[in-house]
C-alpha cells in the first residue's frame, strides 16, 4: 500500500469513528455550532462584537478577521474545491437527521474550517483575547464538520491550513503593497 492510499485509509477510518460518536453533549451542541457557522454568520457576529467593544484595536482585528475569512473562502471554495473533487463521507455512515443538510459540493477542502481558522488567525495577533475565543470556536466548527459527516478529517485540516495561509496573506499584504509601490 502506497503512502497516499495509507493516508486515505486512515482518513476514512478516523472519519467513520468520529461521525456521530462522542459524548452526548457533542450531539447536543453540534446543531447550534453548524447553524452559527453556516454562511459565516458566526464570524460576522464576532466581528461586529469586536468592532463595537474593542475600539480601534477591535475594529482593526475585526477587519483583518473578515478579510482573511473572505480570502480563505475564496481560496477554498472557488479554487481548491474546483481543482480537487472529492465525495463526502458515505451516507450510510451518517445519522439520518444529519443527511438533510449535507452539501452537494466537493468535500475537499472544508470552506467552513478555512473561514474559521482564517478569521481567528488574523484577529489573534491584533487582539489576543478575542483571537483565543475565536480559535476555540474555530476548533468547534472544525470538529462539527467531521462529526456531522460533512467532511473527512483531512478536508478540515487542509481547510484550516488554507485559513492560516489566508491570515498570513492578510498580515503581509500592507508590507507587500508598500514594497512594490515604492
Image (cartoon, grey):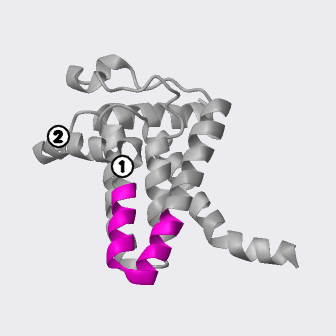
Q: Position of residue 46 (x, y in %)?
A: 34, 62
The answer to whether residue 42 is seen in the rendering is yes
Side of 107 relative to 24 (left or right): right
Mark nearer the N terminus (2 vs 1): 2
49 inside magenta stretch: yes
**Cα separation between marks 2 and 1:** 21 Å
Asked which secondary structure carries label 1, the reply is helix
Q: Position of residue 2 (x, y in %)?
A: 62, 32
Q: To which residue does mark 2 refer?
A: 27
Task: Name the residue beneath numbered marker 1.
Answer: 41
- Residue range in magenta is 44-65
Instruction: Please tell me which residue lies in front, 7 or 110.
Output: 110
* Tag 2–tag 1 contact (CB < 8 Å): no
Q: Residue 173 at what x, y percent from top left? A: 69, 69
For residue 138, what is the image quadrant?
A: bottom left
- Residue 138, magenta (yes or no): no
Between disc 2 and disc 1, the foreground one is 1
What residue is rendered at 43% in x and 36% in y?
Answer: 152
- Give the farthest residue toward the left: 24
Amino acid at each position: 500500500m502506497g503512502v497516499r492510499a495509507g493516508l486515505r485509509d486512515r482518513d476514512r477510518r478516523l472519519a467513520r469513528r468520529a461521525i456521530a460518536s462522542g459524548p452526548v453533549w457533542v450531539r447536543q451542541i453540534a446543531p447550534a455550532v453548524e447553524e452559527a457557522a453556516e454562511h459565516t454568520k458566526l464570524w460576522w457576529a464576532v466581528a461586529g462584537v469586536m468592532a463595537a467593544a474593542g475600539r480601534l484595536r477591535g475594529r482593526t482585528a475585526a477587519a483583518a478577521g473578515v478579510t482573511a475569512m473572505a480570502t480563505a473562502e475564496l481560496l477554498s471554495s472557488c479554487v481548491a474545491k474546483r481543482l480537487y473533487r472529492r465525495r463526502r463521507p458515505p451516507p450510510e455512515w451518517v445519522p439520518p437527521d444529519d443527511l438533510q443538510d449535507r452539501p452537494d459540493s466537493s468535500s475537499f477542502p472544508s470552506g467552513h474550517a478555512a473561514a474559521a481558522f482564517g478569521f481567528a488567525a488574523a484577529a489573534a495577533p491584533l487582539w489576543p483575547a478575542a483571537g483565543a475565543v475565536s480559535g476555540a470556536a474555530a476548533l468547534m466548527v472544525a470538529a462539527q464538520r467531521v462529526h456531522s459527516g460533512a467532511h473527512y478529517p483531512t478536508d478540515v485540516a487542509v481547510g484550516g491550513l488554507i485559513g492560516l495561509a489566508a491570515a498570513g496573506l492578510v498580515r503581509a499584504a500592507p508590507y507587500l503593497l508598500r514594497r512594490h509601490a515604492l
